[in-house]
Image (tube, rainbow, N blue to C red):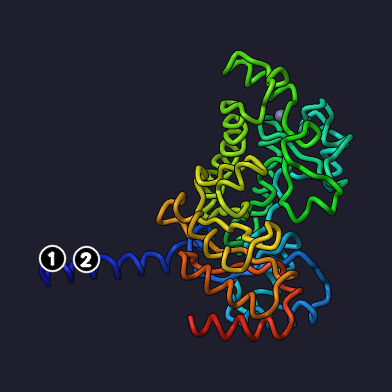
Amino acid sequence: MNRKDFLTKLGAGAAGMAALSSMPAKLHSMTQGRRWNSRDYTWISSHTDDDDEARRRLEKIKRAGLNGILPSGNYEYWVRMAGEFDLDVHAWFITLQRGSDNYLIENHPELFMVNRNGDSSIDKPAYVGYYKWLCPTRPEAKEYLMNRIDQIMELPEIKSIHLDYIRYPDVILPIQLQPTYDIVQDREYPEYDYCYCDACRSKFRDLHGEDPMDLEKPEDHEAWNRFRYNQVTHLVNQIAVSVRNRGKKVTAAVFPTPDIARSLVRQNWPDWNLDAFFPMIYNHFYHKPISWVGDAVAECRREMPATTALYCGLYVPEMTAIEVSQAYEYAMENGAAGITIFPDHTMSEEHWNYLSATMVKG
Ligand SMILES: [Zn+2]
């Protein structure tokens, strides 16, 4: 490019900027979520309506060098408080697990997942009482979730929709959690194996000529496994289109590596059309050392598009302060764009100090 062309281009750029600044307010608010400044985050799972407590927490987050928060609810409240600290707010949205959604449970039990014993996740939830899950194959379930997300996006300050529990119930729990429920999951057992509702059975039968209930070894049936990956993928990609149409970004919390995600919760997330992934690389859940954080990030990166960001999720309640800073280094070294702390209120003063010192160094 010669100098004249360069100046012409520069001029066009400046004109573009001028046009942007005179953009009508409504249009400007629609494009707000397009800016993606956050790099390091924390999930906020413990809520408060005490402004001073919220400020104390947000100040620690900001001072450590994090710049995005992902509250699991009370979005309006967190938007207002985070504004004081110039922190981006991303709406953490619990998607298919609807254990506390009394409206749906009472009015639309037919939209919930059914296990291989034929039991609804409403009547016999696996592991814990709240494991009541919407079936992604049901168009009404999709529509319901899209409406909920539309409501959240009414808040112009929300930068992105962050999908969580966007998967099937764990057909196999991470190894560390199995003793908690006094079970050994050496293979896929029917009470944890979903979804065999009428909608799934008839859609699969139409596509493949078999009723999944009749499969002798469903865990080894490639088409049946792929079918279930696809049900979640279709939902995610549909949500992604709708969120982007509103000028926001869309991301998800996912299981730590693509292989673990597919085999434990039927989540084939490398196929999802998202702006960023937040894999929950909780090494203790899998009896792995801290260095595995780096291995897992590298494994994720191998299946992810090169241009999609990865923010490495860390489970702080089981980590020492030194481990959090080591995990940060392992993650960044292997291609993470940043980290996400779970959750902010379990970080001690020592944790924050170690982490911010490491982030400054990096
Ligand atoms: Zn189903």
Q: Position of residue 62 (x, y in %)?
A: 62, 80
Q: What secondary structure is found at the residue carrying circle 1?
A: loop
Instruction: Looking at the image, tell me whether mark 2 or mark 1 is earlier in sequence order.
Output: 1
Q: Count all numbered tags in the image, as a single digit.
A: 2
Q: Where is residue 20 in the image (x, y as percent from the top left)?
A: 40, 65
Q: Which residue is drawn at 70% across and 64% down?
A: 71
Q: Quadrant of residue 70?
A: bottom right
Q: Residue at x 61, y 47 (%)?
A: 261
Q: Which residue position holds label 2?
A: 9
Q: How crowded is mark 2: few (under 14 residues within 10 Å), some or many (20 or more)?
A: few
Left/right placement of residue 18 relative to residue 88 reads left
**Which amino acid type corresponds to the residue marked 1 in the rendered image?**
Met
Q: What secondary structure is found at the residue carrying circle 2?
A: helix
| Res. 306 visible in picture | yes
Ligand 1: image quarter:
top right
Q: Which residue is drawn at 61% across and 68% down?
A: 290
Q: Position of residue 141 (x, y in %)?
A: 71, 35
Left/right placement of residue 78 relative to residue 250 reads right
Q: Where is residue 192 in the image (x, y as percent from the top left)?
A: 77, 37
Left/right placement of residue 45 relative to residue 292 reads right
**Which amino acid type corresponds to the residue marked 2 in the rendered image?**
Lys
Reply above or below: 131 against 135.
below
Is the residue under label 1 in contact with that under label 2 (CB below 8 Å)? yes
| Res. 146 visible in picture | no
Q: Which residue is drawn at 84% across and 54% down?
A: 180
Extreme-top residue of the structure: 209
Q: Nearer the viewer, residue 334 or 77?
A: 334
Give the distance between the C-alpha atoms of the residues marked 2 and 1, in whole angstroms.
10 Å
Task: In the rendered structure, find residue 1 and report the number of the disc placed on it.
Answer: 1
